[in-house]
Amino acid sequence: MKRSPRGRRPWADHYTHKARKENYVARSVYKLQEIQQRFKVLKRGQRVLDLGCAPGSWLQFASATVGSKGFVMGLDLQPVNLGRLPGVDSNVARTMVADIRALDEDALETIGRGYDLVMSDMAPATTGQKHVDAARSLTLCELALETACRVLRPGGHFVTKIFQGADHSSFSAAVARKFRRREHLKPRSTRKASKELFVVGLGFRSGGTHGRS
Ligand SMILES: C[S@@+](CC[C@H](N)C(=O)[O-])C[C@H]1O[C@@H](n2cnc3c(N)ncnc32)[C@H](O)[C@@H]1O
């Protein structure tokens, strides 16, 4: 973590401090909380797949919301130590280290099926070149959607972060084709300079193709 010479984090804002006070490992949790307030995508007892789950604030919020009868599977390039995540019951959550760009049949079998919600906060390592970052984000979104179409139950929901760029609207149109309702949200906790947007698909229409769209 980059710190200034006096040990302060110059980028830390209201949401960073709030997250620390409320025992969340990242400020990203407030984006999911706002998505939840608007669209009620999470319910008790649900099965949730969390793509790009590290360091784990969405895992914390999702596992508390689905409760002891629910299940949350997290996937990330980075390992997440569930034992160090405040409030996460290891009977409810599991994580796996994997790259969404290279999911083989074994990984898909470990993930399983019948999910009520697939949510992705995956973000590429940024280069500072907006079109490169947007293209990489789009690839992650397409793979998240492809995975969602394999593992969601009919009627399930999908949430993904995307960096707005040349092709984000065609991706959003693909979500609209696969779900009964498609929405967009830029949460209040998203940093002002950020190009990120969340695309939400509600009510998965099963029976389509599972390939890339
Ligand atoms: C903004 S962070 C997610 C924060 C998380 N939602 C939370 O609340 O703690 C984005 C994550 O996406 C992951 N990621 C990026 N590319 C990925 C890929 N190809 N496969 C899996 N995870 C990836 C990164 O490792 C990073 O942990």
Image (cartoon, rainbow, N blue to C red):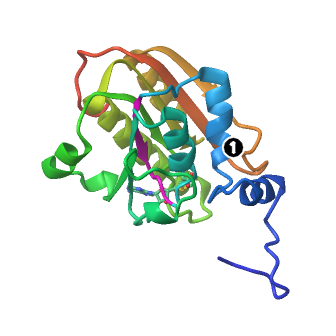
Q: Residue at x 58, y 52 (%)?
A: 57
Residue 130, compared with residue 78, is above or below; it is above
Asked if residue 190 shows in the view, the reply is yes
Furthest residue in direction top, as rendered: 180
- Residue 194 colored in magenta in the image: no
Q: Position of residue 59 (x, y in %)?
A: 50, 48
Outermost residue toward the bottom?
5
Is residue 167 at least partly visible in the picture?
Answer: no
Q: Which residues are magenta?
A: 46-54
Image location (x, y in percent) of residue 90: 40, 53
> Total number of numbered labels?
1
Residue carrying label 1: 30
Residue sitting nearer the eye, 136 or 147: 147
Quarter of the N terminus within the rendering: bottom right
For image coordinates 51% across by 64% down, the residue present is 125
Say whether residue 100 is left or right of residue 201: left
Specify the quadrant of the image occupied by residue 97.
Answer: bottom left
